[in-house]
Amino acid sequence: MKNRIICAILCAIMLMTTFGSLSVFAAEIKDGDTAYVTYGGTVLVTQNPTYSGGIGEVNKGARVTVLEAYVVGEDNRKFHKIQLSDGTVGYVLAYTTARETTPILESAATAEKELNKQWETSDPDKYQHAIEMTFLSDYIYGGSKTTEGKERNFYAKVPTEWVRHDRPASLPLVGMAVVHIGDEGKIGSVKASFYPGEPPINYHAKRLDELKAIGYDPPFAEKTKTAANANTAFYATTTSEFEVVAYNEKWVAVWSEGGVDESRGTIRQCGEQDGTAFTSWKPAVYFLPRNNCYILDINNQVSTPPKIEAVGRATGLLMVKTTPDDTNYVKSGVYKINQSLQIVNSTPEKGHYKIYYKKGLYYVDTKYVNMQLANTEKPTTRYKAIAAVDCNISDGSSVVGSVKAGAAIDVIELDYDGANSKIWFNSRECTVPTANLTDLTKTMTAADTATLGKPIGVLSVDTPWGEWGALTYSAEGLAKLKEYRFGYINVDMDKSIEYSQWVLSNNGDISKIQDREWVNVYGIEEYSFDRDADMLEIPGIDPADIDPWIITGKIYTIFYNGEIRYLVHEDDEHEIFTFYPGNGFGKNSVAKTQTVCLDGLKYNTVAYNIDDNNYFKLRDIAKILDGTIKSFDIQYDGATNSIDMLSFYDYTAVGGELTPGDGVERTARSSSAFLTLDGVPIKATCFNIEGNNYFKLRDITDALDCRVEWDASTRMIWIIPARTAYDDPDEIVG
């Protein structure tokens, strides 16, 4: 009896807190009712209608099914026989005290409205997809509807509730979430919770018990069954994407198809102790912190891509918004500095451009966008530069935009008045103080390339030593190389170390022609010098004691990577390349039909495979990309023998584009044609086949900064205009 009294006292203490005004108007609970725990503390679930023999716990917000209402139990107190969402059957007290005034459970009809208040948003216009746990409770961990979606292939023998499942059709999709830990694009992970806030039960402990029951027993897991881990479902890495089913200013409810660690915890990261305890979870709705998610709202998504009026480049960290308002918007992502974007409407709306972003229409602040309008001629860039400081950009009469330090700037004329430089910004000529520019790099023009004249031959890296590649030097680099005696420094150790550091820095003065690449040669200069001449500078050395050691070699003037460069080769070195004089360099290849895919469309056109690279007519590539943000037109300048790609122009067809291959073998001859982008020469290997110039596809896509991928299974080439040519490890994924 003493123990019974103590137990009753403890129970009364545990149940002191009530659920406010609900007790006054409590509805009578009937057999078969769906009910909710409305008591604000922990409620013991017992095996029988008694105070002891606990088999579980539930907290406020837990939904149960009442099997038998108001069962008279120990001390003539009333209990409810209930079933939890996981199937557990037991008893809970009907009232907090023996006076039977404050119920622990409340019927769904009364409780749902009250319970949902804790998840209400303060701004329903901004957050239109409220979290309603009375609805979502069927889809959270252990819910009855978590396996309604399509089952994913899974070969481990586990119960169906552990098999990966797609989102159930009864669970509406309201958007996508992209995980992040700050707008600067830091890498890390974010905790996903079983429940938004205080969980009704220790979900993590329940998860471990269920894993153990099916034979999955991660090492060290038992020690993680603490209250602190009760709501830890798994960890999502930054850039992970999830389907969103609801969200407010605190939480984002996402669907996860689940995941089971098939190693059963046997494979762990170095130093990991208990991480495997969180690597298996059921398909269900989980909750991520709102401040760690960019939201692609369903209201912003479109089924058909819009027409793009302009392309832009972010000149600062640029927030992607669901609305053009300064405050009433949801963060949907960010563009980092110098990333490109697609502008749907070049006329600002409330100081924002409407953009096409991740298959939806969103908004960015015009202040930090450098916009290029379609079919607008761009003057030749003479210098590439970087903004040294944050500053405004003016067109002479008004401020047309701003840049942050680090933004790329195209310079038309450097220091034209002694203090300012002309730049191309927002599709117009603007000015910026020259002092605000740094990292100036001079660019070539088609006229500059014309000074080379006709090539005298071809240099091809095609010998057994070609895998090493052949070093080339800029004009500045060649001057530096000569200063360092071509690397032969015998006396001055400081100079020798300085030379080694310069070579290792590889700051653009030095680049390498790779194996099986070739370049046009425009001149050959012979050189010779005594490699030990500096020994004569040592005091006390008799010149008669040192025999001359003459080094001879050749300096080839070449055009490579869009620049006039120089290849230096010693006569006694391994033959890394072969020089083919005149027009004696050619490759035989068959005109095959190659399928190129873009935006779900397939294009069949002629291509020649030469040294494992596909070469296409430039006009065929232009035709395929026409109408995308990487569209370009073509014009030829006979005076400079240059082919200019006019970026973001509608392509002007001439007929004959996209003709399939005829299977005939032909000889591809090296071409001296220069390819430029908006007047600036680019890296592009060109073969001439029966009067037509063919270019390596990847050279073109690299110049346009778009992605090309090869699908070996279908033998198709995919071009993805909206993706960068190569992955950027610092890229912020929105």
Image (spheres, helix red, strand yellow):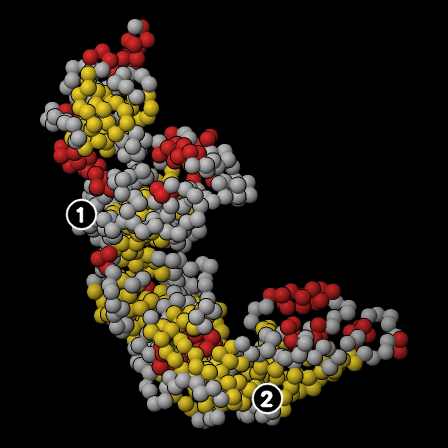
Q: Mark 2 highlights which residue?
A: 585
Residue at the spot x=41%, y=77% of the render? 595
Q: Nearer the viewer, residue 273 or 671?
A: 273
Instruction: Look at the image and tell me whether residue 206 can be seen.
Output: yes
The image quadrant where one finds the C terminus is bottom left
Q: Amino acid at mark 1?
A: Pro
The residue identified by callout 1 is 124
Q: x, y (%) of residue 148?
A: 28, 47
For the question of whether residue 706 can be seen, the reply is: no
Q: In what quadrant of the picture does the N terminus appear?
A: top left
Is 338 drawn above or below residue 233 in the view shown?
Answer: below
Q: Position of residue 182 (x, y in %)?
A: 38, 50
Which residue of the protein is positioned furthest toward the top in this rendering? 1
Q: Earlier in the sequence, mark 1 or mark 2?
A: 1
Residue at the location (54% across, 89% down)?
Answer: 667
Residue shown at 32% from the left, 86% from the top:
652
Q: Nearer the viewer, residue 17 or 99?
A: 99
**In the rendered structure, which amino acid carries the disc numbered 2?**
Phe
Q: How would you rate the neighbour count of disc 2 (Cα within 10 Å): few for under 14, some for 14-19, many for 20 or more?
A: some
